[in-house]
Image (cartoon, rainbow, N blue to C red):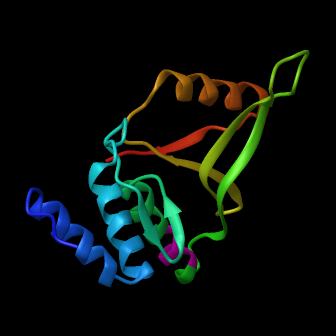
Amino acid sequence: MKNPRYPRETAYAEQQEFMTQQEFMTQREGMARMMAKPSKHKNIKTEVDGYKFDSKLEAERYKMLKLMQFAGVISNLQMQVTFELLPKQDGERKVTYIADFVYDRDGQTIVEDAKGRVLPAYVLKRKMLLFFHGIKIQEITK
């Protein structure tokens, strides 16, 4: 079905007829990624060992901690550990802090957060975690 007035449109339609559904979905996903809005904080989401990290910095730190655990320097490595800072109250949600990494080193529990940028909400949660739980966050920066 060729339309002499719109040759480009016709060629595209013919191309779509011969494309499998999988090929079409792959092309569509690629176009969506190209048109996607850039991240607010300019971070690049990264995947390592099947885990998705919010930034390259966090992914690199995970690789380092994994090697440290393999070498026996640290133990009990956990990711995305949630701490409750304030409980749920009348009509309000609870306030939580999610640590990037928690692990044991030399008999102490270490809480780590990989930060490219320190935002005001994070500073407030860091202070609340120290005040209510007595836990000081070790910040990993670029």
- Residue 68 on the magenta span: yes
Question: Which residue is pictured at 69% across the width and 54% down the height?
Answer: 109
Question: Which residue is pictured at 33% across the width and 78% down the height?
Answer: 17
Q: Residue furthest top?
A: 90
**In-front residue for pair 49/32:** 32
Q: Mostly what secondary structure, the magenta segment?
A: helix
Question: Which residue is pictured at 43% across the width and 42% down the height?
Answer: 115
Counting from the top left corner in percent of width and height, residue 137 is at 58, 40
Counting from the top left corner in percent of width and height, residue 33 is at 33, 57
Question: Looking at the rendering, which quadrant does residue 134 occupy?
Answer: top right
Question: Which residue is pictured at 34% across the width and 48% down the height?
Answer: 36
Q: Residue furthest right?
A: 90
Residue 47 located left or right of residue 73: left
Residue 33 located left or right of residue 129: left
Q: Tell me where the magenta segment starts and ends, as one range.
A: 65-69
Question: Looking at the rendering, which quadrant does residue 135 occupy?
Answer: top right
**In-front residue for pair 133/106:** 133
Counting from the top left corner in percent of width and height, residue 65 is at 51, 68
Residue 53 located left or right of residue 117: right
Q: Is residue 65 above or below residue 90?
A: below
Q: Is residue 105 above or below residue 86?
A: below
**In-front residue for pair 31/133:** 31
Counting from the top left corner in percent of width and height, residue 118 is at 43, 31
